Image (cartoon, grey):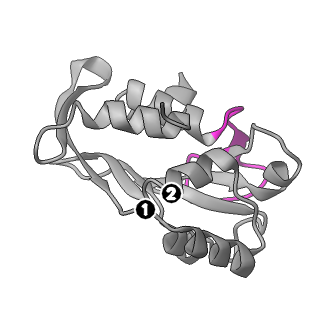
Amino acid sequence: MKNNLSELVLEGFKKRLDNSNRLLVQNRNGKVDTAHFTFNPPANAEEIEEFLRSTHWHLPTDYKDFLLIHNGAWLFKSVRYGGGYELLSLDEIKDNHLDYMPVHWYPISINNGDYIFIDSNRVKDGQNNYLVCFNHDDVSVSEGYYLNMNFETWLERLIIAQGTEFWTW
């Protein structure tokens, strides 16, 4: 039996991919396209501990579980048009946290300039609604909105919704 939802979701999802890690997906307005997926090797406990020491951020358990499976990934990258969701590795998270971003929010996903952040303070306080979304490059506290879910719920729904922004429906 698997220990976490991310592992179950990814295991089931990978069964649908062809030998080139591609999948035919249907999105809005009947648009059908081939999406490509890339999965990084897992992070190890030492890398995660170093990340926590150097950033002073807090990792939610479900996101840490994902990192122990894949330290980053590309999901739903269009073979023709690019895009897709870049799930950042630990190093990429640090590299993509820019000076104008709130100090306690760190980016975990980028999609065509849109960000998904984890609010480290909410994680520290034990809250499960720690994901923050920005639909543009102007990242400020007043412009973001909380998705009211944790990472593994977001990941599962993203896969079920075939890479569409289900949280905007």
Q: CA distance from mark 2 to mark 1?
A: 5 Å
Region rendered in magenta: 132-150
Q: Earlier in the sequence, mark 2 or mark 1?
A: 1
Q: Which mark is residue 69?
A: none
Q: Main secondary structure of the magenta part?
A: loop
Q: Amino acid at mark 2?
A: Leu
Residue lying furthest front in this view?
1
Q: Is residue 1 left or right of residue 24?
A: right
Q: Which mark is residue 68?
A: 2
Q: Amino acid at mark 1?
A: Pro
- Give coordinates of residue 78: x percent, y percent: 22, 45
Judge whether residue 125 is colored magenta: no
User: Can you identify the residue that label 1 sits on?
Assistant: 42
Q: Element under label 1?
A: loop
- Give coordinates of residue 30: x percent, y percent: 23, 18
Q: Is residue 23 left or right of residue 8?
A: left
Of 75 and 32, nearer the camera is: 75
Q: Residue at x 67, y 48 (%)?
A: 61
Density class for disc 1 (Cα within 10 Å; few <14, some 14-19, many ≥20) is: some
Q: Is residue 70 above or below residue 131?
A: below
Of 68 and 81, nearer the camera is: 68
Residue lying furthest left in this view?
19
